[in-house]
Image (cartoon, helix red, strand yellow):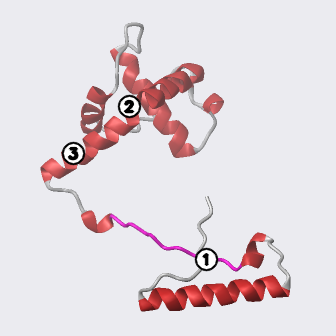
């Protein structure tokens, strides 16, 4: 195969995660089809543009959808993480959780208010913030569901 996407070592890791059904893919086609999926997402090309050496584009596309629906890619990722952890190659410095909240002005959403309504809302928000900073609950707080 001239457009090999995987080394033999990588394939040995991936192959056990790919299901072989009663009606295929046959083991010799499995790598070819998986590499066709890799080609599709690596190049950004359309399924119909896939080189013939990966097999019929429709077969590779159908196989991808079957694998996606069966959770094969999730299992492959979990297996990869487990293998990296076993080898001590997990680098948690690359993990990032971001909980940033950005508030926009009400005009950003296209909301239009009269000046009196806006003033009343700003006053209520200021009172609530003042009460919250003192540890008390604001007066006349209504909960809408």
- For mark 3, does the 10 Å Cα neighbourhood hold few (<14), some (14 to 19), or many (20 or more) residues? some
- For mark 2, does the 10 Å Cα neighbourhood hold few (<14), some (14 to 19), or many (20 or more) residues? some
Residue depicted at 49% across the width and 28% down the height? 64
Residue depicted at 18% across the width and 51% down the height? 85
Label 3 element class: helix
Q: Nearer the viewer, mark 1 or mark 3?
A: 1
- For mark 1, does the 10 Å Cα neighbourhood hold few (<14), some (14 to 19), or many (20 or more) residues? few
Mark pair 2, 3: CA separation: 15 Å
Residue 1, quarter of picture: top left
Q: Give the residue number, with chain letter if any, for mark 2.
A: 72
Residue nearest the viewer, comparing 121 with 110: 121
Residue 139, quarter of picture: bottom right
Q: Give the residue number, with chain letter if any, for mark 3.
A: 82
Residue 78 position within the rendered picture, expressed as x and y whole percent measured from the top left: 29, 42
Residue 20 position within the rendered picture, expressed as x and y whole percent measured from the top left: 35, 16
Q: Nearer the viewer, mark 2 or mark 1?
A: 1
Residue 23 position within the rendered picture, expressed as x and y whole percent measured from the top left: 42, 7
Query: Image check: 19 left or right of 133?
Result: left
**Is residue 80 part of the magenta span, yes or no?**
no
Mark pair 2, 1: CA separation: 39 Å
Q: Give the residue number, with chain letter if any, for mark 1.
A: 103
Residue 21 position within the rendered picture, expressed as x and y whole percent measured from the top left: 37, 13
Label 2 element class: helix
Mark pair 1, 3: CA separation: 39 Å
CB atoms at circles 1 and 3 under 8 Å apart? no
Q: Identify the magenta region.
A: 95-105
Instruction: Say if 66 sits above or below 43 in the image.
Output: above
CB atoms at circles 2 and 3 under 8 Å apart? no
Residue depicted at 83% across the width and 78% down the height? 113
Query: Image check: 103 left or right of 78?
Result: right
């Amino acid at each position: 195969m001239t457009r090999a996407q995987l080394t033999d070592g990588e394939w040995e890791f991936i192959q056990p995660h790919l299901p072989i059904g009663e009606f295929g893919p046959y083991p010799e086609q499995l790598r070819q089809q998986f590499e066709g999926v890799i080609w599709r997402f690596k190049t950004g090309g359309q399924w119909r543009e896939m080189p013939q050496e990966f097999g019929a584009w429709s077969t590779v596309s159908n196989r991808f959808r079957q694998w996606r629906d069966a959770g094969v890619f999730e299992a492959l990722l979990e297996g990869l993480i487990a293998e990296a952890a076993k080898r001590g190659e997990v680098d948690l410095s690359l993990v990032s959780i971001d909980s940033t909240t950005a508030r926009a002005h009400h005009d950003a959403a296209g909301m239009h208010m009269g000046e009196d309504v806006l003033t009343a809302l700003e006053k209520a928000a200021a009172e609530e913030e003042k009460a919250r900073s003192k540890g008390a609950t604001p007066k006349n707080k209504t909960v809408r569901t």
